[in-house]
Every structure is written in structure tokens, then in C-alpha cells.
Image (cartoon, grey):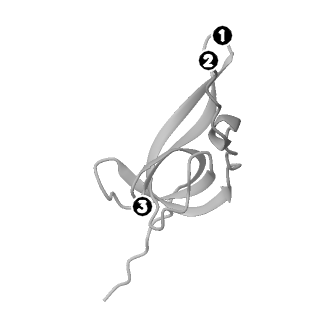
Amino acid sequence: MTSQVRGRRRLAVGVVTSDKMNKTRRVEIPRLIKHPRYGKYIKRRTICYMHDEKNESHAGDTVEIMEARPMSKLKSWCLVRIVRQAPTQAAAPSELAPVPATV
């Protein structure tokens, strides 16, 4: 019996842009490419869907993800760790106290 050696898996760091799905997050991985003719750097992005078993990442978090077997049509990455959490949103003043109606 021979042991199977697993190939080296790709790692990437990106920002969670959507956390509306259960156990699935949408991650954007930004990159800069140089225009072939004009030499100007252009921002591009790669969209990945990752598996988050414990629903611990949220929108705005910077996460490290690892390539995995396909889990669905779009999802083939899994969460390794949360690099940096997004700052929490404070409640807006209009949500704290209702404004009295004037006559």
C-alpha cells in the first residue's frame, strides 16, 4: 500500500465582502497589473467563495484562505485564519433615540 502525497495547496489573503450566506463567504483578492502598452498599474480583483464552518468571519475582515476540494459549484476554498477583524459599526444617532414629532 502506497501513501498518497497531497500536493501543495495555494494560500491567499483577501477581504470578506459578503457574509449573508450560511457557512459561505465571498472574498475579494486584490492585485495590481501593469498595462502592456501604457505602463499604468490597474487594480484587478479575484472573487473566491470560501467555506467557513463556524461562521466566524464577517464582512470587512481580512482572512487567509486555502485552496481545497470543490464543495459546490462556486466554493473551493476554506478559511485558514482571520488575519484582521473589521472594526465594529457603532449605532447611528438616529437609531439610539427616536426624534420627537413637531406639530
Contact? badges 1 and 2 (CB < 8 Å) = yes
Rendered-image quadrant of the C terminus:
top right
Disc 1 residue crowd, few under 14, some 14–19, many 20+, Cα 10 Å: few
Contact? badges 1 and 3 (CB < 8 Å) = no
Left or right, 15 with respect to 93, comes to left
Distance Cα–Cα, label 1 vs label 2: 6 Å
Image x and y of residue 58, in percent: 56, 52
The residue positioned 29% from the left and 54% from the top of the image is 72
Of the two numbered discs 1 and 3 in the rendering, the one whose residue sits closer to the viewer = 3
Image x and y of residue 57, in percent: 56, 57
Residue 23 in which image quadrant: bottom left
Q: Mark 1 or mark 3: name the one nearer the start of the chain.
A: 1
Q: Residue furthest left?
A: 73
Q: Which residue is the site of mark 1?
A: 38
Q: Mark 3 or mark 2: name the one nearer the start of the chain.
A: 2
Left or right, 79 with respect to 68, comes to right
Left or right, 71 with respect to 6, comes to left
Disc 3 residue crowd, few under 14, some 14–19, many 20+, Cα 10 Å: some
- Helix or strand or loop: what does disc 3 sit on? loop
**Residue type beneath disc 3:** Ala
Q: Which mark is residue 68?
A: 3
In the image shown, does 38 or 103 lie closer to the viewer? 103
Image x and y of residue 98, in percent: 63, 37
- Helix or strand or loop: what does disc 1 sit on? loop
Q: Residue furthest top?
A: 38
In the image shown, does 81 or 18 lie closer to the viewer? 18
